[in-house]
Image: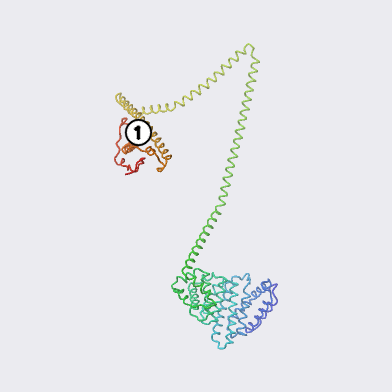
Amino acid sequence: MKPGTDPRILSLAAEVAKSPEQNVPVILLKLKEIINNTPLGSSELKKIKQDIYCYDLIRYCLLVLSQDCSRIQGGWTTISQLTQILSHCCVGLEPGEDAEEFYNELLPSAAENFLILGRQLQTCFINAAKGEEKDELLHFFHIVTDSLFWLVGGHVQLIQNVLQSDHFLHLLQTDNVQIGSTVMNMVQNILQINSGDLLRIEAKTLHSILDEVIFKLLSTPSPVLRSTATKLLLLMAESHQEILILLRLSACYKGLRSLLNKQKPGIEFRHEFRQLISLLSPKVYQEVEEQKLHQAACLIQAYWKGFQTRKRLKKLPSAVITLQRNFRFKRAKILLKLKRQKEEEYNRLQLQLEQQRAMRLSREVRLNMLEIVHPGQVEKHNREIEEKSALIIQKHWRGYRERKNFHQQKPSLVEYKAAVTLQRASSQMSDVASRELHSQAQERLQHYFMGRALEDRAQQHRDALKAQISTNIEQLMKAPSLKEAEGKEPELFLSRSRPVAAKAKQAHLTTLKHIQAPWWKKLGEEAGDEIDVPKDELSIELGTLFIGGTKPP
């Protein structure tokens, strides 16, 4: 016996264990009174459900429901009440250590037993002859479906098991109006709790459900069944765009919208029927597609932003470490700089103090020497000191002057040493060859200087042309428009003739080629020699040149 166990549960479990098998269902009905007398949502009710599960009374209920209903005392009345007890005990129960067994075995088994009982009640209802018996069986069927809905509402993971069950498909495929509307209402209530599991079932099962709902909508004469089918199909299409696209594009449902347009809906479900037709229209489908693309784009952006954020968060510690390292390095560098400045300042002050100390000591030594020297020798002593000072100043000045001259003559000295090295390395030449080589060098040097003078003149000419162009541009900027021009103002912008422009182009190309040529090609040229320019380089379109005051032909 567990401590704190409810004595009613303990007594009931002992009675079930001692009683014969045929009396167990009636004994289990006492659980309903215990549950109903306990406040809903209280901790006491939760404890009672745990005690019921701990003493395996829930399993006893499952075993009873799996038996033949004809062997159970009280028949369908007892069975329907046991389904209510089982669903209420399973919802809100915390199984504790046996959670895996409870969720993976007991709950799916309970849902499957409820569907089996529904099929048995469906068979009995169809085979019943009396109206009172049919009403009673339909009432029991409602209790079983309500118990199944209560169980699924407390454990939404069972929705997929229920929708994929073959017994559920058989219940949905019934031709009876009462049974069919009850089953579709249950499906509608289940999908309102969680419609996401509808897409997790197999495609074959989903198509079977859609086929049966559409069949009831188009082929059943009952307005109640058609209304329920319309509401269920509208809920499925509005909840999932995939189902709406399937109804629009799948070959299985081709012509569905045209068939719906031919139907005459009842007053009770006319609004839902029109909504369904409008959902299947191309315009709404296009809007759904755009909404789907928008949601996909938002999802991609969310994943990308999340990836970027996680990436930045991963790099954040290393970035902080790098920032701290750089800050410490910079701070250490600044402190080292300040320390060096302080040391330099200290050394400078020490040097000044030492210089002042040495100056005082020197003056004291000179005063002491003046005291020792005879008064008649003071002038002679001062003169000697002045001569020594002058010699020191002259020595430092000559050293500075010679170092300056050496630095100025250093390039010439380097050239001289290079010439000596080349002369030593070269072979012995005759006097005639040396004179000829010397004359050639002189000629080339003269040619170089002449070419340099030509280049200077050409540069001056280019500068003058640039100045002229700048002046023309300035005049053009300040010139009035053609409407405002008066007198001889347009004549100020007339240019020279086209031959002059062509000649200028030729001279420009000649100068550019001469400047860009290497120096060794210019050695054999004379000053003023003209350089031939190929005709293809002179082939220019004069119409593209700016010639102020003229128009292109």
Corner quadrant of residue 507: top left
Viewer-side residue, 189 vs 62: 189
Corner quadrant of residue 428: top left
Task: Name the spot of residue 240 as percent of width and height, x first.
Answer: 51, 69
Going 54% across and 53% down the picture, which residue do you hit?
A: 312
Viewer-side residue, 541 vs 121: 541
Helix, strand or loop at disc 1?
helix
**Is 135 on the left or on the right of 488, as rendered?**
right
| Residue at the extreme front | 487
Which class describes the residues within 10 Å of circle 1: few (<14), some (14-19), or many (20+)?
Answer: few
Task: Name the spot of residue 79 as percent of width and height, x first.
Answer: 61, 82
Task: Name the spot of residue 282 as percent of width and height, x first.
Answer: 46, 69
Viewer-side residue, 334 vs 467: 467
Query: Is 169 above or below relative to 130?
Result: above
**Is 320 on the left or on the right of 46, as rendered?**
left
Q: Quadrant of the N terminus?
A: bottom right
Q: Amino acid at mark 1?
A: Trp
**Is 103 on the left or on the right of 456, as rendered?**
right
| Residue at the extreme top | 376
Q: What residue does disc 1 label?
A: 519
Going 62% across and 29% down the picture, which residue do you hit?
A: 350
Task: Name the spot of residue 451 as percent of width and height, x first.
Answer: 34, 30
